[in-house]
Image (cartoon, rainbow, N blue to C red):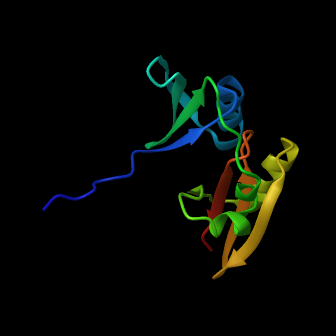
Amino acid sequence: MAKITRALHTGISVYNMDESVEWYEKNLDFKKIKDDYVPPLKARIVFLSNGEYELELFQYDQPKPLPKDRLMPNDDLQTVGTKHVAFEVDDMAGMKEKFLANGIEIAHEVQMEGNSVMFIHDNSGVLIELIQNN
């Protein structure tokens, strides 16, 4: 029987590729592994890697803005569709300290079932969830 063997990547559209690559490298320790322009899509596509997990960033020649209701976790969760990418972290307090030092606003923090959960926005406004399982 056919089955999924692993998650490959998550695709994220961004406004400015160079700024986004720098943001993901600086704040979430991703490294650029591939950078191409795809004429039929009219988009630059960059793959970033952190361990075995990859992000695929798209910068279209004419990007459409992120709707305002997608900026807040609780509002966004009510809208049908893909919501966010989530990463497990080993030190939430350390991550928060790093984000605040880098000028990243914390969108939402909560304890859920004893686990620390924090949402931030990347430099394009895309929600990212971080979870420390306690």
Picture coordinates of residue 72, whole percent (x, y): 76, 61
Image point (65%, 43%), residue name:
28
Image point (77%, 60%), residue name:
93
Image point (67%, 63%), residue name:
76
90 shown above or below 65: below
111 shown above or below 121: below
1 vs 48, nearest the viewer? 1
In the picture as drawn, the residue positioned furthest to the left comes out as 1
Image point (69%, 27%), residue name:
16
132 vs 39, nearest the viewer? 39
Picture coordinates of residue 120, whole percent (x, y): 74, 54
Write down the quadrant of residue 2 in the picture.
bottom left
35 shown above or below 72: above
Q: Is residue 34 left or right of residue 2?
A: right
Picture coordinates of residue 106, whole percent (x, y): 81, 57
The image shows a total of numbered marks equal to 0
Q: Which quadrant is home to the N terminus? A: bottom left
14 vs 118, nearest the viewer? 14
Q: Which quadrant is home to the C terminus? A: bottom right
Write down the quadrant of residue 108 in the picture.
bottom right
In the picture as drawn, the residue positioned furthest to the bottom comes out as 113
